[in-house]
Amino acid sequence: DAGVTQSPTHLIKTRGQHVTLRCSPISGHKSVSWYQQVLGQGPQFIFQYYEKEERGRGNFPDRFSARQFPNYSSELNVNALLLGDSALYLCASSWGGANTGELFFGEGSRLTVL
Amino acid sequence: AQSVSQHNHHVILSEAASLELGCNYSYGGTVNLFWYVQYPGQHLQLLLKYFSGDPLVKGIKGFEAEFIKSKFSFNLRKPSVQWSDTAEYFCAVNRRDNYGQNFVFGPGTRLSVLP
């Protein structure tokens, strides 16, 4: 069975550019969450989407946005990139959107901002 | 704001040694608790979870964790580690009064097991 898939796996951008990261959840999962993991730290919550609606938002600036499509895949967009946005961006899916769910993670998209 | 702390940044053990990794969280309400593991080059995987009931939970690969509500702790244990347990371990908390799945992760503990 396919797990959570993310693309691209690695990318390099320069300051001020825009990036779009993509995620396909496990088949049957309706919730997608995005996390940012800076080197040496634990993942930090950015967004959760369930049934195409935003269910939660972490403490990130408005440069970060996301959406979920009818097939439950998701995109994370980051505008006006800063050096500090360099991180591993993780997507996680779960069957339901409730707070009793467990998360299944993808391998991440590693973003380097120069 | 809710936070999760992990006692050790890096733990080095020999094979067959016992392991205990500490985790404390700051939220006073009801929580769901998780330990995730990240093996070298792999994605985060669930090791075990606690939602309710018996505070001693067993996970995969011989790991267990004990929830002590009075201490706001959820420590991970394994009686005898193997070289293959070398990985980064993350404790995570999700508040029950959250509408969704805002998991708060600790900073992680890197475990190195020497053969």
Image (cartoon, helix red, strand yellow):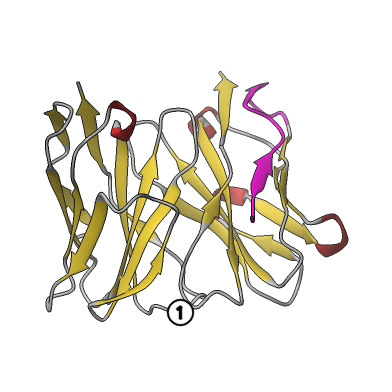
Q: Position of residue A72 (x, y in %)?
A: 18, 73
Q: Chain of mark 1?
A: A
Say which quadrant the N terminus of chain B sits in.
bottom right
Q: Which residues are magenta?
A: B1-17
Q: Position of residue A24 (x, y in %)?
A: 17, 62
The answer to whether residue A73 is left or right of residue B113 is left
Question: Is B6 colored magenta in this rendering?
Answer: yes
Q: Residue at x 79, y 56 (%)?
A: B72
| Quarter of the rendering containing residue A32 | bottom left
The answer to whether residue A25 is left or right of residue B47 is left
The answer to whether residue A92 is left or right of residue A23 is right
Q: Amino acid at mark 1?
A: Ala
Q: Is residue A29 above or below residue A104?
A: below
Residue A6 in view (yes/no): yes
Q: Residue at x 18, y 28 (%)?
A: A15
Residue A3 in view (yes/no): no
Say which quadrant the C terminus of chain B sits in.
top right
Which one is nearer the viewer's eye here, B54 or B32? B32
Which one is nearer the viewer's eye here, A1 or A42? A42
Q: Position of residue B95 (x, y in %)?
A: 61, 68
How many discs appear?
1
Furthest-right residue in this view: B70
Question: Is A25 colored magenta in this rendering?
Answer: no
Q: Residues within 10 Å of mark 1 (few under 14, many from 20)?
A: some
Q: Which residue is mark 1?
A: A98
Which one is nearer the viewer's eye here, A48 or B78? A48
| Quarter of the rendering containing residue A67 | bottom left
Which one is nearer the viewer's eye here, A25 or A87? A87
Q: Position of residue B52 (x, y in %)?
A: 69, 76
Q: Residue at x 27, y 52 (%)?
A: A64
